[in-house]
Structure formats: C-alpha cells, structure tokens
Image: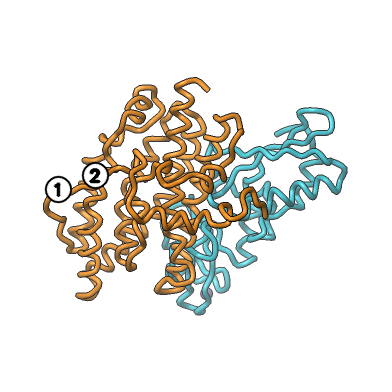
C-alpha cells in the first residue's frame, strides 16, 4: 500500500466509524421506541447506517489486501482507534434528543454524500450514491419530527430545545477538516467539509425557526473524534458492541 | 447481458424473500451472470439499500441453486455503481407485486398511491419506514386496510 492508498483506507475507516457508531446508537431503540412505527423507522435507519459502515470497511479491507475484514475494524479496535465524530457516540437520551441529533447529522450527511459521489475513488463514490438516496428519506423524517416536537406540547417543545442546546457544541466538529482530509481533498478523493457549513447552517436555521426552537447562543465546541479522543460514552458502547468477539475471539455464526 | 441463457433461467427461481412473487432479475438486483473460467460462475448483485438484510439470504440462495445444478464454484460479486433504482423493476413484476399486496413505486407525487385492495386513492402515509427499509406503511381510508408501498429510490 502506498501513502495515498493508506490515506484512502484511513478515510474509509473513519466514514465507516461514523456510520457504525451512529447505527449502533439507533439500534438501541429497537423494541422500546415510543410507537411501533417509530420502532420500525429507527431500526430501518440503523440498518442503513450499519450497511453503510460495512461497505466502507470492506473497501478499506480490500485496500489492505484483505489481510483484515470489515469485522476486524468493527470488533477488534479500541476506543482510541475509532475516528468517528463525537456527535455519533452520544447516548440516545430521550426521543427528542435522538431525533434532534438525527436531524443535525442528516442535514450534514446528505450534503456530504452528495459531495462524495464526485470522488475519484470509484468505490467511495458508489457507496455515496446509495447513501444519498437513503439520507433523503432519513432527513425527510427527522426534519418532520423537529416540526412535530417543536410545535407539539410545551413539554415536547422544551425537550427539543434542551436537546438542541446540548447537541450544539458537537456540530462544529463536522466541518473541521484535519490533515488527512485536506490531503485527500487535494487528490480529489475526499469532501471538503468546511465548504458544507454555510448551507448546513442555513437549512438548520430554517428548520429551527419552523420548530420554534431558539438557535443556541455562544460558541462552545467539543472536538477530538477524528484524532481518536472520545467522550466517556464510546467505551461503554464498544463494550457492548464488541462483547462477543472479545470473549470468543474469531467466533463465527 | 451475458450469453449463458440456461443460468439466467435457473436463477429465475431465486426470489427476494420479502417479495416472493418477483425474481431478483425482475427486481434489478441480479445484474449479470458470467463464466470467467471453466466451471466457475460469477454472479453480480447490487443491493437495494446499503443495509438490506435480504442480500445475504439472496446470495446464499443463489449459491445453493447453482450448486444443486452442478455448479459448485460460485463467486458473488457486489456492484454498487450505478446505484440501484426502483425504476429498474420490470413492468410484469410491478403487476405481480401489486397483486401480492405491495404497491410498486410511483415516480412523482405521493397522492396517486392507490390501495391494492380496493383501488381507492384515499390513502394516508402512516410511516416512511414499513416492515423493511425499502417499504413505507400506508393505510387506505376507504376500506381501512393497511398496506406496504415500495418507495421510489
Ligand atoms: Zn382500500
């Protein structure tokens, strides 16, 4: 693997990490969502993300000459080796928190995946083309829930406002390219996420207004996921996600 | 399409487990079949949705079907590009899908989704996500029956 390939592999793994960790969080609702329809919707959205992670990981494994597999990335790496955005690993919280997070990342991922369809890396572009179609559905639903919760009862409105307040500081990280991303943007492989921020902010402002939710003041920001510096929550998530492979290494179904 | 008509006929028997009235070829999941080497059959598949759990089952069914017909060496190749589109579903398959109770995807607006039981267009979206990722859940206001709608993608 030359340096460029190594970088493309790392990029694929971090995109796989985003999708796996968020997909796992969404799957935690399975069987206990507030309504049957929501249970199905959350589980299906989780499947889309987990499927996405498999595609990104498989491609990375191919670049490593298949010495490893998608499972190696998912089940055998420790916290510090994961490169997902922090917003993906935050616990589900209440339903308002889950949907607010989903809305904020759906706006991001739709634009991101649209950009990635232009990647010179054919496989990344192919995964992105599928993801764009799925993200449109995710976004339609999460945006609708923002309106419903925001304009619902006093309690649903307050819960949504609290969720947005608590999530706000985790959003800047989505738009901060690191060295790897910058290098791959120059090579035509990666999406320049700093260029997505203005349109994202415009769309989010509009939705928050429709939901009668205040955009949080101040500019606190938490970052570090892309460097492997995580919140305390990721370790707990991984201990559940990786339990079987940790207890019985190499076990197959 | 590759020149192995007997293999295509053979794989007509493989259905999507969620829509057992439509073959994977009619659904557009089965992209190509070829024999790159003596005794080897390579089957190219494209998933409907990234996380579609039926894909693994379909791949297993293909391998089993070919094995039973004397082709022990089967390679499954996954193709992502171009991304699967619901417009690839063949017209005959759409008809059978509807008779089965799943409304096939409609290209433009949502208001022309007619109930598969009574043909009424007085229908309501219950959830964007139905029993599987590829379907939405609707209810007919005229006859009261719930039904699946295969989403355009
Ligand atoms: Zn009806």
What label sits on residue B118 in the rendered view? none
Name the quadrant containing residue A28: bottom left
Identify the residue at the far right of this view.
B70
| Residues at marks 2 and 1, CA–CA distance in whole angstroms | 9 Å
Q: Which chain is orange?
A: A
Colour logic: by chain
Name the quadrant containing residue B7: top right
Residue sitting at x 84%, y 33%: B39
- Read off the residue under disc 1: A219
Image colour assigned to chain B: cyan
Is the C-beta of the residue carrying label 1 under 8 Å from the nearest atom of ligand 1? no
- Read off the residue under disc 2: A172
Q: Do marks 2 and 1 both belong to one polypeptide chain?
A: yes
- The tag earlier along the polypeptide, 2 or 1, is 2
Query: Are the residues at dot 2 and dot 1 in contact (C-beta closer than 8 Å)?
Result: yes
User: Does A151 sit above or below residue A215?
Assistant: below
Q: Secondary structure at mark 2?
A: helix
Chain to which the residue tagged by mark 2 belongs:
A
């Amino acid at each position: 693997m030359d340096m460029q390939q190594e970088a493309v592999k790392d990029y694929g793994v971090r995109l796989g990490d985003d999708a796996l960790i968020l997909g796992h969080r969404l799957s935690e609702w399975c069987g206990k969502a507030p309504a049957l329809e929501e249970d199905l919707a959350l589980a299906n959205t989780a499947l889309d993300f987990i499927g996405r992670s498999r595609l990104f990981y498989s491609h990375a494994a191919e670049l490593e000459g298949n010495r490893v597999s998608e499972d190696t990335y998912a089940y055998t790496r420790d916290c510090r080796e994961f490169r997902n955005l922090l917003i993906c690993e935050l616990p589900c919280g209440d339903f308002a928190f889950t949907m607010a997070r989903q809305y904020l990342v759906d706006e991001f991922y739709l634009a991101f995946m649209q950009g990635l369809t232009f990647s010179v890396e054919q496989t990344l572009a192919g995964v992105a083309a599928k993801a764009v179609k799925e993200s449109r559905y995710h976004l339609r639903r999460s945006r609708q829930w923002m309106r419903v919760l925001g304009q619902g009862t006093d309690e649903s409105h307050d819960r949504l406002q609290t969720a947005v307040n608590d999530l706000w500081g985790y959003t800047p990280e989505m738009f901060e390219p690191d060295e790897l991303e910058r290098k791959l943007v120059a090579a035509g492989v990666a999406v320049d996420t700093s260029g997505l921020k203005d349109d994202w902010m415009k769309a989010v402002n509009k939705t928050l207004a429709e939901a009668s939710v205040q955009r949080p003041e101040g500019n606190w920001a938490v970052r570090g996921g892309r460097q492997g510096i995580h919140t305390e929550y990721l370790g707990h998530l991984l201990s559940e996600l990786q339990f079987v492979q940790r207890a019985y290494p190499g076990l197959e179904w | 399409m590759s020149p192995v008509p007997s293999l295509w006929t053979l794989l007509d028997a493989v259905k999507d487990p969620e829509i057992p009235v439509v073959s994977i070829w009619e659904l557009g999941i089965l992209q190509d079949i070829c024999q790159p080497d003596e005794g080897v059959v390579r089957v190219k598949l494209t998933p409907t949705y990234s996380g579609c759990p039926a894909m693994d089952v379909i791949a297993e069914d293909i391998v089993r079907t070919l094995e039973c017909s004397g082709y022990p060496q089967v390679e499954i190749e996954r193709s992502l590009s171009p991304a699967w589109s619901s417009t690839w579903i063949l017209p005959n398959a759409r008809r059978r899908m509807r008779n089965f109770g799943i409304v096939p995807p409609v290209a433009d607006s949502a208001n022309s989704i007619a109930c598969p039981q009574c043909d009424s267009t007085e229908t309501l979206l219950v959830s964007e996500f139905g029993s599987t990722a590829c379907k939405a859940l609707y209810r007919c206001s005229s006859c009261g029956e719930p039904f699946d709608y295969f989403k355009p993608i």
